[in-house]
Image (cartoon, grey):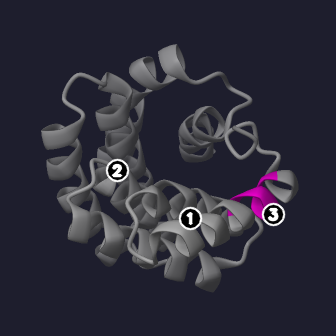
Amino acid sequence: MLFRSRRFDEAGPLLERAITLVERQRGRDADDLVYFTSNLALVRAAQRRMADADALFGRAAAIARKVDHPMLGPVLTDRANLWCRMGHTAEGLALTTEAAKAVARDHRDTAWRGAWVQNVRGGCLLAAGRGQEGLALVRQSLPPLEKRWAANTMIGAAARSRLTGAAR
């Protein structure tokens, strides 16, 4: 999990290679591509290649919808996070609503997944100038995220940064 430990420059080429191999062996709509494509999108977002990240998230979401993949909710959550970081807060908030439904359906036994949607939504609300509402969601989401993700991981760092960023 190079990208989760924020080793993005190492993860990118490996994910590109995995995508190429899966496409060659199983086709452009293979269910494995949801995971690899969304992870490459996270790498591109970390590298500040936002348009590339958005296109990759879009592709991952389209495949996930087509094959009814359980990673649809997480992909939508990460895309919402990207959109809100890019200033598209209304669209990001709408996407968190759809993501929350998919995560509740497919990951009801994984508390940190629902908390991540909530944390991203809180970040979107903060970016939209809805500070109290956003900060409340961020605070509420932290316990399951802190239990699962160390502060030096991609998700752990992002979740905690929303709290510290809101406190400024």
Residue holding disc 2? 71
SS for callout 3: helix
Quadrant position of residue 94 = bottom left
The main secondary structure of the magenta stretch is: helix
Amino acid of disc 3:
Pro
Q: Position of residue 98 (x, y in %)?
A: 19, 61
Q: Around disc 2, counting alpha carbons within 10 Å, would you say few (fewer than 14), some (14 to 19), or many (20 or more)?
A: many
Amino acid of disc 1:
Val
Foreground pick, 135 / 56: 56
Residue holding disc 1? 22
Q: Position of residue 24 (x, y in %)?
A: 58, 74
Q: CA distance from mark 3 to mark 2?
A: 22 Å
Residue holding disc 3? 13
Amino acid of disc 2:
Met
SS for callout 1: helix
The magenta region covers 11-15
Q: CA distance from mark 1 to mark 3?
A: 14 Å
Mark nearer the N terminus (3 vs 2): 3
The reply to whether discs 1 and 3 touch (Cβ–Cβ < 8 Å) is: no
